[in-house]
Amino acid sequence: MAHSNSMRVLPAACLILSMVILLIVNCTNKSAHSRICSEQKGKWSALLNRKAQHPLDPLTHSEMLAVQTLLRNTSLLGKERQVLHSVELEDPDKQEVLRWKPGQPIPTRHAEVILTIDGVPRKIVVDVGLGKIVEDTEIPGSGYPPISVDDFEKIMASPATYQPFLDSLAARGLKIDEVLCLPLSPGWYGVPEDENKRLTKLQCFVHKDTLNIYTRPIEGIVIVLDLTTMQVTRYIDSPANKAPIPKKDGTDYRFSAQTPPYFAALNPISIEQPLGPSFTLDGHVVKWANWEFHVRPHGRVGNIISQAKVDGRSVMYQGFLSELFVPYQTPEQGWYFRTYLDAGDYGLGIFSLPLQPLNDCPRHAQYMDAVFSGPDGAPYITPNMICIFERYAGDIAWQHAEVLGNEKIHEARAKVTLVVRMIASLGNYDYIVDWEFQTDGVVRVKVGATGVLMIKATDMTSVDANVTKDELDDMRGTLISENTIGVIHDHFLAFHMDLDVDGPNNSFVQGKFVRYSEPPEVSPRRSYWAVEKHVAKTEEEARIQFSLDHPSEFYVVNPGKKTRLGNQVSYRVVPGTSISSLLDPRSSPQTRAAFTNNQMWITQYNRTEKYAAGFLTSQSHGDDGLAVWSNRNRNIEDTDITLWYILGFHHVPCQEDFPVMPTAEASFEIKPTNFFERNPILKMQPNH
Ligand SMILES: *[C@@H]1O[C@H](CO)[C@@H](O)[C@H](O)[C@H]1NC(C)=O
Ligand SMILES: *[C@@H]1O[C@H](CO)[C@@H](O)[C@H](O)[C@H]1NC(C)=O
Ligand SMILES: *[C@@H]1O[C@H](CO)[C@@H](O)[C@H](O)[C@H]1NC(C)=O
Ligand SMILES: *[C@@H]1O[C@H](CO)[C@@H](O)[C@H](O)[C@H]1NC(C)=O
Ligand SMILES: [Cu+2]
């Protein structure tokens, strides 16, 4: 839903972000923070002193400090009109990572630094070991990097001095200190006044008397701000659209704000693990049952699962939530541009908050902290950013019971899985992203969407007989409280799945289900279905749109590996929730998010093709991204390939979504298919 977009609120946003930054830990040169630093130092010493143990480990605290020193020394940081957006580990060469064995020296570590200098995006690659810049280039293409934390403080300050905005507030009986404005990503629409400027569009809310600011929008005002000059370049206050501010009553979702009667309390519940969990976390490497994988936090995509192996055989080199697309469906000035690409426009890891034990993750979860770069290049910690836990939901892994004469057989195994969880809190919306590993070799990727809707204010207080059909049509949503419309929208989530099924060289096979008939002399029945398998040779042959009328199964096979019976070793992609986009393919949001043209894609592996809407998404024109790469139409047969699964759902809000929505879940899975010789969990122990 809403999802989106906004940032952690201005003052509040800043508050939250700066709290995180304060926690930090760079004591060397931030005297203002040093008290906190010295108190925190003991607690975080293990993290502060950590060294990379694996080629894919994220940049450590000391590596980030080294990058900061180098950037300062080369005058790339700390000057006017220089904005630092991110410092991340640059993906090492895949072959080097695959060759590496624990205990060997780690291959050269590179930091990828994204800056804008005078409004021009630059990528700098630092050899961390040598303390040297090895690449420094302007980033080609139309997009800009995400809004940085640094931008926030300046953005927050800007409306307060802009007289036309103060006049608009006065006309509505509001004061500036009752108002917060959030920087929304502006999309790209070819509006001449907006071209060639790094922009944000501010949407303002009344924060007086409620924590749930998203429910109190000031409709009709849009402030277009140039992020390079921090000047207002356009200001819109549509007189036609002065809906009242929705009331504060009923918007607080905290338990303390609810009044009796309460929902009957359930008895306390907790899954016991009297002997502790069954997994180990060593640095970033997780081992559990027949699985082993590496997990690391990432500022842009939240987290990355790497080198997932079952029974020591590789399944996936890397998997992560590559991009989101959340287009709203109403044409007003303040709304038409809301077509968020949340990972590239904001950053899923940067917008994660510490997970709360017992509510966000169960007892016995283990937590992983993240180290991200602040706007001045100083590293800061987001504690408990990822949690890892075993899930037992009372389900059955396999079972069979029967009576044969005097013999009764009853064999059953409880289903326990391992979950890696991250929650991106992108302003009003919260996305819970779970990677769930099963002992039978299945990996389920599940997303839960929750949080607060993006709300449009309206004159309407009910949809009774006095409301005309035109007014109803113009709502583009549902009246979910008085003066409050939950606007309709979609959620698309693109998962990058670099599957390496039993080795890097794989092919993509589509098993098409077709009807066939037999003549009466062969069979008294008229029709059957059968599976026809097709190996996709090029990227074009692997652009998949799901259809109930033309069902298919989809396999990533290893053409060089067979079972003892000669079946091709593979993993099957089991689609879950998916939608197709209803937007005009020529419209700019659809071109920019063209990864939603299909529900599944295969591309040839390319280390730099990671982000489905392109490397820089803010104001991008659609000149980079999955659709562009797929158009190269490279060979994808018996070579290293990447699968992209586009999960999605439409959202027509309802009253139950107010003032906070119950989690809506969507998922897909990958499932071993002739990968094992038999049911791999036959020898699992039953419970006693
Ligand atoms: C900055 O660069 C100069 C010239 O390369 C070098 O002599 C100096 O040691 C560097 N300072 C730091 C703090 O790295
Ligand atoms: C509908 O409009 C009539 C005339 O303006 C008014 O008397 C009536 O109260 C309205 N009904 C509701 C439910 O608002
Ligand atoms: C790898 O991806 C980059 C970015 O899309 C592109 O410039 C390059 O040509 C690609 N290489 C191959 C072999 O496709
Ligand atoms: C994978 O395929 C590429 C060509 O696409 C080939 O160069 C390479 O040797 C193959 N690797 C393996 C392990 O078979
Ligand atoms: Cu939604």
Image (cartoon, rainbow, N blue to C red):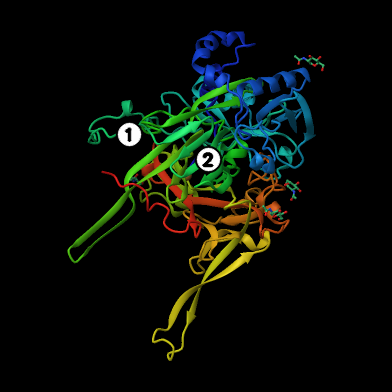
For mark 2, give the secondary structure.
strand
Number of marks in picture: 2
For mark 1, give the secondary structure.
loop
The quarter of the rendered structure image containing the C terminus is top left
- Quarter of the rendering containing residue 204: top right
User: In the rendered structure, which amino acid carries the disc numbered 2?
Assistant: Phe
Q: Write the residue at 53% across / 65% down.
A: 567
Residue 501: x percent and y percent? 57, 53
Residue placed most toward the observer, 70 or 130:
130
- Answer with mark 2 or mark 1, whichever residue precedes in sequence: 1
Residue 352: x percent and y percent? 51, 31
- Residue 293's tag is 2
Query: Is residue 58 visible from the viewing direction of this image?
Result: yes
Q: CA distance from mark 2 to mark 1?
A: 22 Å
Instruction: Report which residue position mark 1 lands on.
Output: 273
User: In the rendered structure, which amino acid carries the disc numbered 1?
Assistant: Gln
- Quarter of the rendering containing residue 448: top left
